[in-house]
């Protein structure tokens, strides 16, 4: 983290605030076919396997151009065969997007939708798989970034494996900060992107998959450019990406991976993000704000707060007030109750989070908001769901 920060802090779930050294790594050009860049691609692929504790004899990482959603689509289209059927575990916008992606591809799927507040549980997965033998794959969201809920990946993976089905994971906003260990977690493939918890810049994502699953994925994809098998096979053969690679983003990502390792890898990053979350939640609650989620489902990635009921509160003004004080926050993405989000990820530490809370308090005062408490109906809705 740099001492000098002139740009606003991005309290957003990616793109996020990056370390100056990550941005500086982009200050030259690389030829995509040149051996220097091929070595960078190879090093990045190896380091990604390390982060997942994935044995290179059994696993491979495959970078894919595009934003995270392109890579989710690539994973779904490549690993779910055209005659397969997916069970999508949804509890927010990203679960719903996975289902929509399958609908657009015309792949058979069913959805368990838990709304905005609650995680899909292992026993629900077991019941759904027992009831429908046609289901071949389960699609799970590791951290549902729309609410900030941390889903119980281990029990979902166990239920899926116990039923003899395959697990595909969207670990976009979790990988690198939350544990995902290929030695103990049974899964087929997972996907994440450069601009989330590894703290790189946008431009590409990556799939980490079992090699046998990659072999078996030949011919499955609905799309040429989003074919993970084809990208993998070409990269193994030539060391190159199939089409123009985001060279500068890859250079930045390598630096970001280096900083990630220097911080103590995933456990080190989790410790900093958890501290960010604790300072943020404690400060915002002291200011009168309420979180959407119960403490046990709050992730160290992003926190959703209910919008205050006070008629003097206006989100657009609150956003501008925060921005004027150097903080970019994130609008809510809930289906029912008005909310906003503040991220804990990126090159931020607890002193930044403390300053963000102070900025929120000042902005409320400036707006003439007396209480940050949400409407009683929001709290009632939260109580009803958590009791269910
Ligand atoms: C960020 C994110 C994505 C991908 O979003 P893009 O805007 O396409 O990068 C997918 N799933 C989850 C859970 C995410 O947090």
Image (spheres, rainbow, N blue to C red):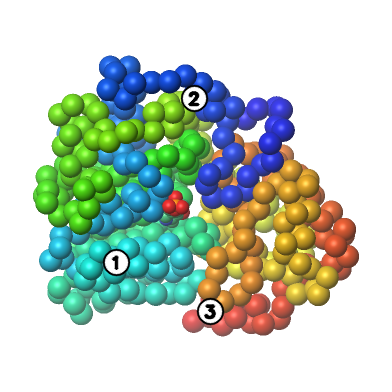
* Quadrant that contains the N terminus: top right
Task: Tell me the crowding category of disc 1: few under 14, some 14 to 19, or many 20 or more residues within 10 angstroms, Cα based.
Answer: few
In this rendering, the answer to whether 216 lies above or below 102 is above
| x, y percent for residue 254 | 42, 27
- Which of discs 1 and 3 lies nearer the camera? The answer is 1
Mark 1–mark 3 distance (CA, rounded to whole Å): 31 Å
**Residue located beneath label 1 in the image:** 104
Lower sequence index among marks 2 and 3: 2
Going by the image, does 215 lie left or right of 306? left
> Observer-nearest residue: 103 or 138?
103
Please provide percent x and percent y for residue 165: 18, 63
Residue linked to disc 2: 26
Q: Are marks 2 and 1 in contact (CB under 8 Å)?
A: no
Q: Label 2 vs label 1: CA separation?
A: 36 Å
- Identify which residue is drawn at 64% across, 72% down: 338
Q: Secondary structure at mark 1?
A: helix
In this rendering, would 366 be left or right of 372?
Answer: right
**Apparent side of residue 153 relative to residue 26 in the rendered image (left or right):** left
Q: Nearer the viewer, mark 2 or mark 3?
A: 2
Q: Which mark is residue 318?
A: none
Estimate the spatial distance between the alpha carbons at disc 2 and disc 3, rounded to whole Å. 47 Å
Of pointers 1 and 3, the one earlier in the residue sequence: 1
Q: Which residue is mark 3?
A: 385
**Residues tagged 2 and 3 counted as in contact (Cβ below 8 A):** no
Residue 201 x, y percent position in the rendering: 49, 37
- The residue located at (66%, 77%) in the rendering is 379
Residue at (22% x, 67% y) in the render: 107
Position of residue 249 relative to residue 298, above or below, is: above
Q: Picture quarter containing residue 309?
A: bottom right
Q: Tags 1 and 3 in contact by the CB under 8 Å rule? A: no
């Amino acid at each position: 983290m740099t001492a000098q920060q002139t740009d606003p802090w991005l309290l957003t779930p990616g793109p996020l605030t990056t370390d100056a050294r990550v941005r500086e790594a982009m200050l030259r050009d690389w030829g995509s076919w040149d051996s220097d860049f091929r070595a960078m691609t190879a090093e990045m692929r190896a380091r990604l396997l390390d982060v997942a504790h994935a044995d290179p004899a059994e696993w491979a990482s495959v970078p894919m151009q595009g934003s995270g959603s392109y890579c989710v689509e690539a994973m779904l289209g490549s690993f779910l065969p055209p005659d397969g059927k997916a069970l999508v575990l949804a509890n927010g916008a990203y679960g719903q997007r996975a289902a929509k992606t399958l609908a657009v591809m015309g792949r058979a799927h069913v959805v368990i939708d838990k709304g905005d507040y609650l995680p899909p549980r292992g026993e629900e997965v077991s019941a759904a798989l027992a009831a429908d033998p046609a289901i071949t794959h389960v699609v799970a969201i590791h951290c549902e970034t729309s609410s900030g809920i941390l889903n119980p990946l281990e029990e979902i993976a166990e239920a899926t494996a116990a039923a003899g089905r395959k697990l595909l994971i969207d670990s976009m906003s979790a990988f690198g900060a939350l544990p995902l260990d290929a030695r103990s977690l049974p899964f087929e493939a997972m996907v994440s992107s450069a601009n989330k918890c590894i703290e790189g810049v946008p431009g590409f994502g990556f799939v980490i998959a079992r090699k046998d699953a990659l072999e078996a994925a030949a011919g499955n994809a609905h799309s040429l450019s989003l074919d993970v098998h084809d990208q993998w096979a070409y990269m193994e053969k030539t060391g190159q990406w199939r089409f123009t690679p985001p060279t500068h983003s890859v250079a930045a990502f390598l630096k970001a991976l280096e900083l990630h390792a220097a911080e103590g890898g995933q456990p080190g990053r989790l410790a900093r993000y958890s501290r960010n979350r604790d300072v943020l939640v404690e400060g915002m609650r002291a200011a009168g704000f309420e979180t959407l989620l119960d403490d046990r489902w709050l992730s160290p990635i992003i926190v959703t707060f209910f919008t205050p009921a006070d008629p003097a509160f206006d989100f657009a003004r609150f956003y501008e007030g925060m921005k004027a004080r150097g903080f970019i926050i994130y609008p809510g993405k809930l289906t029912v109750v008005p909310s906003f989000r503040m991220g804990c990820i990126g090159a931020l530490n607890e002193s930044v989070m403390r300053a963000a809370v102070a900025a929120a308090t000042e902005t409320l005062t400036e707006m003439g908001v007396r209480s940050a408490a949400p409407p009683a109906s929001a709290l009632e809705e939260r109580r009803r769901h958590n009791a269910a």
